[in-house]
Amino acid sequence: MQPNLVELYKARDFPIFQNKVFSSETEARKCARGDITLVQDLKTGLVYNLTFQPELMQYDTNYQNEQSHSNAFRKHFIRVAEIIHRHFTGMSLLEIGCGKGYFLQLLQDQGYSVLGLDPAYEGKNPSVIRSYYSSKLGIKAEGIIMRHVLEHVTNPFFFFV
């Protein structure tokens, strides 16, 4: 291990998704698995999974992470929208990992110009692109929203480079 890394936690053969829906118990038991080695980089302070394998991650329509069914989360979305209002009013926004689009739609209903990215998106909003973020997409925005996404990024320190 690199001298600037401190190991915090380790687990082997762990299911890689907690939000995947399977059609049978057998399919669920055969789910993709990976190892977890949480480390902290002493130079940047970032904590990440050193043994993360991005090629195992398949975000598709079976990835169900919708939170808007919860009253508590809907209240949380409103509080987050209030924070965005304080800092980003009048700016173009990009929501990376917009999920099923509930929060994006909430912002659009409040008059924001917001584009969303998510390969697991299931709706019909033309402002959502079913894709992972990549600088190669050429998308520009004045503000970026990343709710529950950073932990899915292989190298967050260089994500936007």
Image (tube, grey):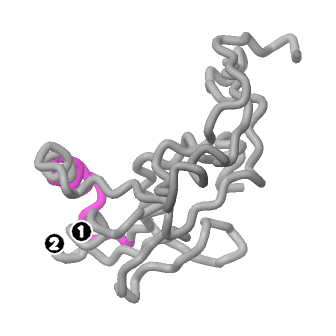
Q: Quadrant of the N terminus?
A: top right
Q: Which residue is mark 1?
A: 107
Rendered position, 109 above or below 25 = below
Rendered position, 101 above or below 10 = below
Whether residue 6 sits left or right of residue 140 in the image: it is: right
User: Who is closer to the viewer here, 146 or 100?
Assistant: 100
User: Who is closer to the viewer here, 148 or 71?
Assistant: 71
**Circle 1/circle 2 CB separation < 8 Å:** yes
Rendered position, 60 above or below 11 = below
Quick one: label 2, few (<14), some, or many (20+) residues within 10 Å? Answer: few
Looking at the picture, how far across and down is residue 72, in whole percent?
Answer: 14, 43
Asked whether residue 83 appears in the rendered view, the answer is: yes
Q: Residue at x 70, y 15 (%)?
A: 42
Q: Residue at x 53, y 77 (%)?
A: 130
Quick one: label 1, few (<14), some, or many (20+) residues within 10 Å? Answer: many
- Res 49 quadrant in image: top right
Helix, strand or loop under label 2? loop
| Amino acid under disc 1 | Leu
Q: Give the spatial CA distance, label 1 vs label 2.
A: 5 Å
**Is 91 colored magenta in this rendering?**
yes
Magenta residue span: 78-92
| Amino acid under disc 2 | Gln
Looking at the picture, how far across and down is residue 59, in whole percent?
Answer: 58, 62
Dominant SS of magenta comes to helix
- Res 127 quadrant in image: bottom left
Q: Residue at x 41, y 77 (%)?
A: 122
**Is 134 colored magenta in this rendering?**
no
Helix, strand or loop under label 1? helix
Q: Which mark is residue 110?
A: 2
User: Who is closer to the viewer here, 1 or 33?
Assistant: 33
Q: Residue at x 62, y 20 (%)?
A: 45
Looking at the picture, how far across and down is residue 123, in whole percent?
Answer: 36, 80
